Image (spheres, grey):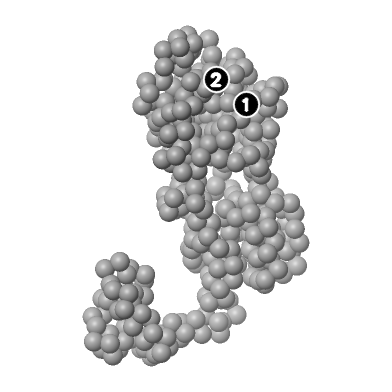
Amino acid sequence: MWDENKVRIIDIANELGLSTATVSNVLHGKTKKISDATVKRVENKLEEMGYIPNMAATLLARNSSRIIGVVVNDHEKYEGHVFEDSFISASINALSDSIEAYGYFMMLRKTKDIRDIIRFSTMWNIDGLVVIGFCAEDYHDLREHMRVPFVVYDGYMDQHAGISNISIDDFDGGRQVGQYLKTLGHKKVLCIADNNVCMDLDRYNGLCDGLGQKADFLLIPMDKDKRKIFYQKKLKTILRYTAIFAVSDYYAIDLMKILFENGIRVPYDISVVGFDGGRDSLMTVPALTSVYQNNEARSQMAMELLVKMIADPGFFESVSVPVKLVIRDSTCNYSVSSQHVQNLTEI
């Protein structure tokens, strides 16, 4: 164990003439109410007295730290709230259980720069990593510059030596949506997404395959405020469709709020389907029809692969987890939507 008595917080506080609470807050990143000058003084003293290096040295001296790092891309679309996203939070919750079940500890980090993962994993002597939300080129770059085994939990990439990848069947998820909407009689279907590549493109292509015809596609802004203005301008266009497939629950729920604010009834004026099937999809009124992806199965598979990679550095594998459409109240048979055309002309 790391011997905290070698360098204690109280020792650092006394050296600087500060309270132990101030030193502790700097250590844990709670610096909003602390001046930049004080933060710098504490950081310099921590380094000088070897507080953090002592901890890192202890971990580096071990053959195994029993730490699994979980790193999430702090993408701009989350607007600074990445851990509040329903898919991300559900993934972290499931991973926490799986990591603990294998006798490891989870260390969580968010970053915009995938190279930051290299420093993070080295500092803590991390045994393995689960990485969420980056692009294929980022993963390739990471593999070239780091020896720590890692599993891509949610990304879009072809099989690559040294990288284990867990994907879901995005195309089949979209196909299930298309088939279902077709059985309901929907022919005018729109797909909304913030990009038209990778996973979102697969979901769109699956939708078209299930419908047996090409659905229209609308590229929406990532920024929430810009998206709201965009929807107001495109409202008449949107109401030309009887069903909308959003490539994520986040965008589906966001659209439902806009429609509600404009007096448009879901599903009677327009049906809405999402993709993720998290807890948020159950909390909407009406409850959101969505493609469910099993995070428990995905996190279990992530740890199975990671444990194999830790034991055998040459091991890597790509697996796909099936998805399932869960039908709820945000969709209905098009014949029920008798007011659809009237709503279009009145707005």
Residue denoted by label 2: 241
Quick check: can you spot residue 264? yes
In this rendering, is residue 15 above or below 265? below
| Left-right relation of 7 to 323 | left
Circle 1 packing at 10 Å, graded few (<14), some (14-19), many (20+), is some
| Left-right relation of 210 to 299 | right
Q: Nearer the viewer, residue 29 or 129?
A: 29
In this rendering, is residue 55 above or below 278? below
Q: Nearer the viewer, residue 8 or 78?
A: 78
Task: Name the amino acid, label 1.
Answer: Asp
Where in the figure is residue 114, as x and y percent of width and height?
A: 58, 63
Quick check: can you spot residue 90? no
Where on the picture, by quarter, is residue 49? bottom left
Task: Name the amino acid, label 2.
Answer: Tyr
Mark 2 touches mark 1? (CB < 8 Å) = yes
Residue denoted by label 1: 216
Q: Residue at x 50, y 56 (%)?
A: 74
Where in the figure is residue 312, as x and y percent of width and height?
A: 72, 69
Q: Nearer the viewer, residue 332 or 105?
A: 332
Q: Residue at x 36, y 75 (%)?
A: 27
| The C terminus sits in image quarter | top left
Image mark count? 2
Q: CA distance from mark 2 to mark 1?
A: 9 Å
In this rendering, is residue 70 above or below 27? above
